[in-house]
Every structure is written in C-alpha cells, then in structure tokens.
Amino acid sequence: GKISLYLPTNASAKEKEIAKIAASGNANEAMALTNKAIQTEKHTSGLLLLRIALYEILLQEEKIPADFRQLLNLPMGEEELIRALDLADRLDELESGVKLGDRYIKEHGRHQPQAILLTARMNSKLKQYSRAEQLLLLVLDDPPMRNFTYPELARVYVYWNKPEKLIALSTM
C-alpha cells in the first residue's frame, strides 16, 4: 500500500523524491534511494530520519539504533531535532532520545515545550524520575502545555513512588 512519510517544510529535493516513491507504495525502492543518498549527500540527518521511518515500515527495527547513534553527532536544525525526539519516543530508543532531548534544550532552550515533554517522558521510561520532574517543571507554567504536563508529572510521581509529591500536585 501507500506509505506516508513525514516531511518538514524545509525538506530537500532528495527527501521529497524519496517520500514520493514511498507514497507510491515502493518502500524498498525508497529505502535503496535513501541509502544511496546518505552516502552522497552532505546533510544526512533528514535522510537518516526518513530511513528510520522506512526501517519501521519494513519491519527492520534491529537497524534503527545505529541510525540514532549517527544522529547524535550530526548537525540538525530545530525541526529535525523535534522529529528525532518524536521518533525516539515512539520507537523506544530512549537513551538516544534523552541525549537528543538534552541537546535540544542546550541549543534551543524552552522554545518548543513539546520537545521538553518528550524528553521528560523518555527519562521517566528510563526510571530517571528526578530528571523527568525537573524537565516537566520547566514547562508547567506554559499555559498551552498545562493539560499535557500535569498528567505526565502525576505519572512520574506514581512510578517514582512519591505520594507526597502527587498529593501536593493535586492541591495546586
């Protein structure tokens, strides 16, 4: 069937070509073109993100961690970092996701609270509850994010076995 790959607004011509091939139902051809482009193109982070998505579609999950490790050292814009965080969370690439999230915070601060929320969620899955709490408290005061942050913070306190913090949260 047809495959829909997410493309950012600033996608390269090669990324668009790959997405078009995937959309026509040719995932293997799209993967081959992606692999070739990664070897010849200068800016590969967007291509690696496409390849990770194609690995997932083609049920080749065992190859995903290596691409995430490559992403850690590549230059990426804000939108690519957010895409990488979303993929890392969805695919349970938690260690790489946390490193990418910390990089996002270092490079972009609190510009996109969703990135911080994803990083906190991955920290929580890794049982790094104190760090997850710190991150969630960073975005708690962002009004559009409150509806997402409170449940996430409550989840951290439950898993962390901190009923006193959960009670304090419920009285806020």
Image (cartoon, helix red, strand yellow):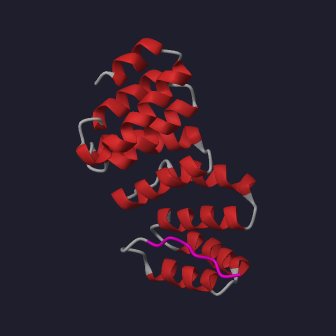
Which residue is at 75% across, 60% downward?
60
Spot occupied by residue 33 in the image (x, y as percentages of width and height): 63, 79
Residue 77 visible in the picture: no
Which residue is at 46% across, 54% downward?
74
> Of residues 99 and 130, which is closer to you in this image?
130
**Image-based side of 52 in relation to 144, left or right:** right
How many numbered dots are placed on residues in this image?
0
Which residue is most to the top? 164
Range of magenta residues: 1-7
**Image-based side of 78 in relation to 93, left or right:** left
> Of residues 33 and 123, which is closer to you in this image?
123
Spot occupied by residue 134 in the image (x, y as percentages of width and height): 36, 27
Question: Looking at the figure, which quarter contains the C terminus?
Answer: top left
Which residue is at 48% across, 15% downward?
162
Question: Looking at the figure, which quarter contains the N terminus?
Answer: bottom right
Majority SS type along the magenta span: loop
Residue 155 visible in the picture: yes
Spot occupied by residue 89 in the image (x, y as percentages of width and height): 55, 47
> Of residues 133 and 167, which is closer to you in this image?
167
Q: Quadrant of residue 51?
A: bottom right
Taking the magenta stretch, the answer to whether it contains residue 11 is: no
- Give above or below for 84 relative to 27: above
Which residue is at 45% across, 28% downward?
154
Spot occupied by residue 21 in the image (x, y as percentages of width and height): 61, 85
- Give above or below for 31 relative to 158: below
